[in-house]
Amino acid sequence: MTLIKFEISHSKLDLLIHIFNRKNLNQVKEKAVISKLLSIPSVFQWQQKTFNNYNNVKEEFSEYLKDGPLTILDIGCSTGFCGQQVFDMTRDQYVGIDITPKYIEYARRVYKKGTYIIMDGRQLEFPDQSFDIVSFVGVVHHMEDEIIKACLQEVKRVLKPMGYMLLGEPVLTPNDLRSNIFLSIDRGKFIRESSQYLDLLSGFEVVRKRYFGFSFHRFLSVVTRPNKLDI
């Protein structure tokens, strides 16, 4: 009887392993397909318009965007839709950068207001203390720690002493099945806990930290400025 029980248990274990591996394999395939589709600028733009309510982002950071004109650097601007919805393109001097040429070409073609440049955030081609606002909206979870740390060193250089860096990033939410399912197939490989995002911000003073709803997710909202001792 003991042997039979062991065989049944072993069989169930094999089945669970098979299901787990198959689920992971399917998830990898899904991610690959989604990533390929979203690399097409028009598809990515459709996804941004359909699923993302950028009015929530605008409202979340409105306290820091209301007084202008402002000089704004939007890092990881993609096809430009986010910036167009969040910032005052008529009043402010907006620059969006991204490392994906197809996204920048699309933004330049579709939007007449704002400046769009192919640029790596680790090597910003701007003078010191150029910007009142630097923003990362749904960008940092696509970056490894070392990459974002290098970007933030450059941000500290180009941000004015009384300027602000605005950061909005998704966090995993316990018991929120819908959000966690969508995050599991997100192209961003580095969705972090709130504390892990904050750990990256050494050299910055955290002025405000809280959460807001965006798309299906809970987003961490952080407003920082350069540490006075580092200026």
Image (cartoon, rainbow, N blue to C red):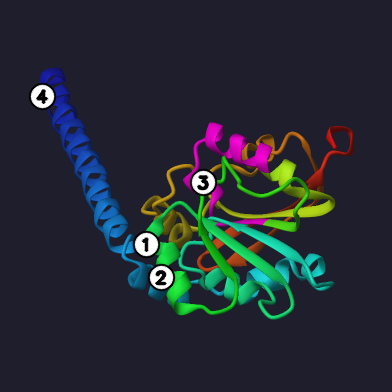
**The N terminus sits in image quarter:** top left
- When the figure is inspected, residue 123 is found, relative to residue 34, above or below; the finding is above
Cα distance, mark 4 to mark 1? Answer: 60 Å
> In front: mark 4 or mark 1?
1
User: Helix or strand or loop: what does disc 4 sit on?
Assistant: helix
User: Helix or strand or loop: what does disc 1 sit on?
Assistant: helix
The residue shown at (73%, 34%) is 202
Read off the magenta span: 135-154
**The C terminus sits in image quarter:** top right
User: Helix or strand or loop: what does disc 2 sit on?
Assistant: helix
For disc 4, the marked residue is: 4
For disc 1, the marked residue is: 102
Judging depth in this view, the residue of 39 and 15 nearest the camera is 39
Judging depth in this view, the residue of 178 and 120 nearest the camera is 120
- When the figure is inspected, residue 231 is found, relative to residue 86, above or below; the finding is above
- Using the image, tell me which numbered label, if any, was put on residue 120: 3
Q: Earlier in the sequence, mark 3 or mark 1?
A: 1
What secondary structure is the magenta-colored segment mainly?
A: helix
Cα distance, mark 1 to mark 2? Answer: 6 Å
* Tags 4 and 3 touching, CB below 8 Å: no
Judging depth in this view, the residue of 227 and 199 nearest the camera is 227
Residue type marked 2? Tyr
Cα distance, mark 2 to mark 4? Answer: 64 Å
Classify 10 Å Cα crowding around label 4: few (below 14), some (14-19), many (20 and above): few
* Tags 1 and 2 touching, CB below 8 Å: yes
Let me know if residue 47 is in the magenta part.
no
- Using the image, tell me which numbered label, if any, was put on residue 106: 2
Residue type marked 4? Ile
